[in-house]
Amino acid sequence: MKCHLKFDYDQHENAEKIVLSYGITSSAAREAVAQMRAEGEKVSLLIAKTLLPVPPVYLEILKKI
């Protein structure tokens, strides 16, 4: 059986922060990140679509910040 891991990752090259979102909060998170970037913040956005078990790729992304 194959596991198809899905997530959206809007990476900012020099991000100092990351917003992690899941489900219904994703739209609000996208808006918040857009506002933060407009204000000069260096922020990335990770929208998880698989939660359990926690995919190792999420941890790799979070360690970068």
Image: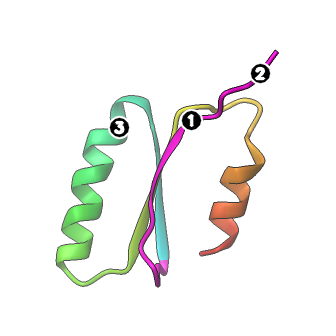
Q: Picture coordinates of residue 8 (x, y %)?
A: 46, 46
Q: CA distance from mark 3 to mark 1?
A: 16 Å
Q: Quadrant of the C terminus?
A: bottom right
SS at circle 3? helix
Residue 2 marker: 2
Name the residue that disc number 3 marks.
25
x 24%, y 84%: residue? 40
Span shown in magenta: 1-16
x 19%, y 80%: residue? 39
Residues under numbered marks 3 and 1 in contact, where contact means CB atoms less than 8 Å apart: no
Residue 6 marker: 1
Q: How many marks?
A: 3
Residue 49 marker: none
x 22%, y 63%: residue? 34
Q: Which callout, 3 or 1, points to the residue nearer the camera?
A: 1
Q: CA distance from mark 2 to mark 3?
A: 28 Å
> Local crowd at mark 1 within 10 Å, few (<14), some, or many (≥20)?
few
Left or right of 19 on screen, residue 1: right
Left or right of 52 on screen, residue 46: left
SS at circle 1? loop
Q: Quadrant of the N terminus?
A: top right
> Local crowd at mark 2 within 10 Å, few (<14), some, or many (≥20)?
few
Q: Picture coordinates of residue 13 (x, y %)?
A: 45, 80
